Image (cartoon, rainbow, N blue to C red):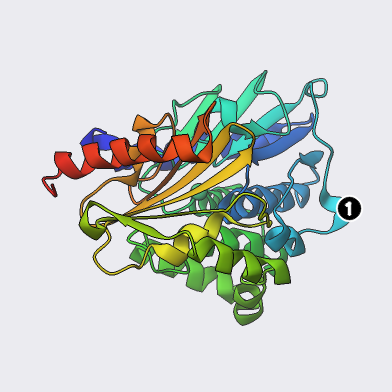
Amino acid sequence: MDAGHNAPEPRYWEKLRTIAGILRELEGPIVVVSHVDPDGDAIGSSLGLARALRTLDKDVRWIAEPPRFLRFLAREDEYADPVEHLPEGATLVVLDAAEPGRVAGAPVEGFVVNIDHHGTNPRFGYLALVDPSKAATAQIVKDLIDTLEVPWSSDIATPVLTGLITDTGNFRFSNTTPEVLRTAAELVGYGVHLAELTDRLQWRPPGYYKAMGAVLSTVEFHFGGLLVTAHMPPGVSVEDSDDFVGLIRYAEGSQIAVFLREREEGVVKLSIRSRGGLSAQAVAVRLGGGGHVPAAGATLRGVTLAQAYPQVLAAVEEELRRLGYI
Ligand SMILES: [Mn+2]
């Protein structure tokens, strides 16, 4: 990965003003979507922008399928159904989607506005505002809503703050900049019930805790403890399982953590985390995936769980060698 990957977008505010100006003038439908397997930033940034645009009396279709733990953010009547073709004269606003192939709920066609913070985003769409220096797409949406001059309410601020909270790991990751904390403070000032929100974001179904036990029984250490892995044992399934990587990543001495899950037969999803100068993103890219330097993911196809392990170990070994750890 080149060093410029997390560089800020130099024409950030200029591009925001262009996008805000276009959105304000639009008369046709605005379809707001995000990425497959949506996380808190995907749901929060898209829902926040959808709500802000609705206050401007726009015809907004928010297409999203939030995971269980995020469903409390939206009301039933806010959802639109996924579409195979965009409505006549529609504009597609894509949020937090690192590549067009990851966009969920609508085809990437016609007039596309692409707003994201993944350095690997190929800047697809008619207008692309990609700023990898931002902690979350929700930060860009916050600035866009300001630029649109939409009055803030707790209804709009709550999903936007959710994106900031989840993408910074509750303000713990290295992307928690002064800008993030200032923005969070401002959003809380718009009436967000912070304690209630952070409590709700941690709710998991009872089965999750049983699955956690099963996952922890698969923990293994490799390369003298530099890599810690675990997987979802076959037969165990639970929603919201992606954050099991968060369970193992704090193993003392580990620099990389990988959680493997067989999504369906022959499809293994990887969640990768790193520290100490190592790049989870570089490991993910070697395995056909992408993401951020400290947190990334990949999907292996045509492999069993057992066959996925050697591929993971080889990709991690290359990264450990690159940085001189082994
Ligand atoms: Mn994000």
Residue 9 visible? The answer is no
Q: Which residue is mark 1?
A: 77
319 vs 161: above or below:
above
User: Total marks drawn?
Assistant: 1
Amino acid type, residue under disc 1 in the picture: Asp
- Seen from the viewer's position, the closer of residues 114 and 214 is 214
10 vs 164: above or below:
above
Q: List the single residue furthest toward the bottom.
A: 195
> Looking at the picture, how far across and down is residue 33, in whole percent?
68, 38
Q: Is residue 42 left or right of residue 16?
A: right
- Seen from the viewer's position, the closer of residues 159 and 53 is 159
Q: List the single residue furthest toward the right.
A: 77
- Seen from the viewer's position, the closer of residues 88 and 166 is 166
The residue sitting at 21% across, 57% down in the picture is 224
As helix, strand or loop, the secondary structure at mark 1 comes to helix
The residue sitting at 77% across, 48% down in the picture is 54
Residue 187 visible? The answer is yes
The residue sitting at 60% across, 51% down in the picture is 45
- Seen from the viewer's position, the closer of residues 290 and 247 is 247
The residue sitting at 63% across, 77% down in the picture is 199
At label 1, counting other C-alpha atoms closer than 10 Å, the crowd grade (few under 14, some 14-19, many 20 or more) is few
210 vs 132: above or below:
below
> Looking at the picture, how far across and down is residue 64, in whole percent?
73, 44
> Looking at the picture, how far across and down is residue 87, in whole percent?
82, 24
Q: Is residue 258 left or right of residue 265?
A: left
